[in-house]
Image (spheres, rainbow, N blue to C red):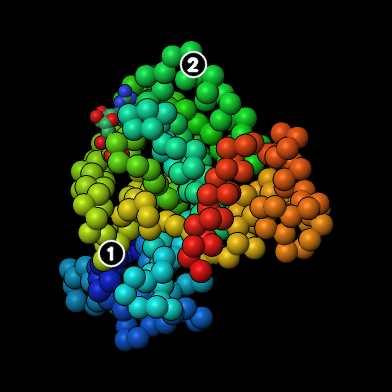
């Protein structure tokens, strides 16, 4: 039998079986996925084969196989070098909830999130919440942001989770997909999830609160079914979804507008920081690349450099 892993504690895995039941399963011995060196072989979003416990009325089972993954996101282990922690697998899209104020989500933060998702080749949705608080100035700022992000294939939505505005289009985007949900504390994640399905509110809030206290090194992501076939993964902390061991040479790969033109740079190993004949710098100069995006690139490049 097969099913979907919706929760992982590292020892036990909660599986939603294909025939619609929910069971707790353990791993059979040392099950390893080929080519992975991770602390946790099975992650939320994994599809697994399992053997149900034959005892009547038992809701337990044994995982016998991890089915091949479409993708997965990982974070470096803070405990063991060379080891990684798989946060989630088989993600269809990553959704960032952002707000212009209360709290303000910076463009730098948005770009970091998008680049991280792009590094895993995961499509992105940018949701601006609290539209009920906007006046003319905010509306036109949102318009400008859409003009930056839509051309690089980021789906941009505006909603008010509180007043339930814009949720129909959002629901369509979430339908039959596994979506990773992220955003600063206070942007309205719980309010949104509650608006989508009142029954799962509490669980999300608990996870978010836990993550905010900074004790998330051993927590695991959890997945919620918001409607049949539509799942949200609440990451236990925004830091978890960071870039994984990126070299400066690859960074521009995670900025689609730079990736598109970087083979026009004079030097094949151009860092787009100062080189002569750099196509990226020229595009920034003539306005084809948004200044805020290039600033984010610079700031990330600096961080990557410090890390080495
Ligand atoms: P979380 O930390 O991301 O889960 O954020 P919450 O859902 O707890 O929301 C934080 C605060 O923002 C709460 O006081 C919510 O009532 C408020 N809030 C959430 N969504 C909206 C919205 O669309 N408009 C307004 N005005 N406030 C909102
Ligand atoms: Zn260049």
What is the tally of numbered marks visible in this picture? 2
Q: Position of residue 124 (x, y in %)?
A: 53, 45
Q: In terms of depth relative to the viewer, which is nearer, 128 or 79?
A: 79
Tell me: 121 left or right of 96: right
Q: Position of residue 174 (x, y in %)?
A: 46, 42
Badge 1 marks a residue whose secondary structure is helix
Q: In terms of depth relative to the viewer, which is nearer, 293 or 83?
A: 293
The residue depicted at 75 percent of the width and 35 percent of the height is 286
The residue depicted at 31 percent of the width and 55 percent of the height is 236
The residue depicted at 37 percent of the width and 55 percent of the height is 239
The extreme top residue here reads 136
Residue hosting label 2: 137
Q: Is residue 260 above or below residue 101?
A: below
Circle 1 crowding by C-alpha within 10 Å: few under 14, some 14–19, many from 20:
some
Q: Position of residue 244 (x, y in %)?
A: 49, 64
The extreme bottom residue here reads 29
Circle 2 crowding by C-alpha within 10 Å: few under 14, some 14–19, many from 20:
few
Tell me: 267 left or right of 244: right
Residue hosting label 1: 217
């Amino acid at each position: 039998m097969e099913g979907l892993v919706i929760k992982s504690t590292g020892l036990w895995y909660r599986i939603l079986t294909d025939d619609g039941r929910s069971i707790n399963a353990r791993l059979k011995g040392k099950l390893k996925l080929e080519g992975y060196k991770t602390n946790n072989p099975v992650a939320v979003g994994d599809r697994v084969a399992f053997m149900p416990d034959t005892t009547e009325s038992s809701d337990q089972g044994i995982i016998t196989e991890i089915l091949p993954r479409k993708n997965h996101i990982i974070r470096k282990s803070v405990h063991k070098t060379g080891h990684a922690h798989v946060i989630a697998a088989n993600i269809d899209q990553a959704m960032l909830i952002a707000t212009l104020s209360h709290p303000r989500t910076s463009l730098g933060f948005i770009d970091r999130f998008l680049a991280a998702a792009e590094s895993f080749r995961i499509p992105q949705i940018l949701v601006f919440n609290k539209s009920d608080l906007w006046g003319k100035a905010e509306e036109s700022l949102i318009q400008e942001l859409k003009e930056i992000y839509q051309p690089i294939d980021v789906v941009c939505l505006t909603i008010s989770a509180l007043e339930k505005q814009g949720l129909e289009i959002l629901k369509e985007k979430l339908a039959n997909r596994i979506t990773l949900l992220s955003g600063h504390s206070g942007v309205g994640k719980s309010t949104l999830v509650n608006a989508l399905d009142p029954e799962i509110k509490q669980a999300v809030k608990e996870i978010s609160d836990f993550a905010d206290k900074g004790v998330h090194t051993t927590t695991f992501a959890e997945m919620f079914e918001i409607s049949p076939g539509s799942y949200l993964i609440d990451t236990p902390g925004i830091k978890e979804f960071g870039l994984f061991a990126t070299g400066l040479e690859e960074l521009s790969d995670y900025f689609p507008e730079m990736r598109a033109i970087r083979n026009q740079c004079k030097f094949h190993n151009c860092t787009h920081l100062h080189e002569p004949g750099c196509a990226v710098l020229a595009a920034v100069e003539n306005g084809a690349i948004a200044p805020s995006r290039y600033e984010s690139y610079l700031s990330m490049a600096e961080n990557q450099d410090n890390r080495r």
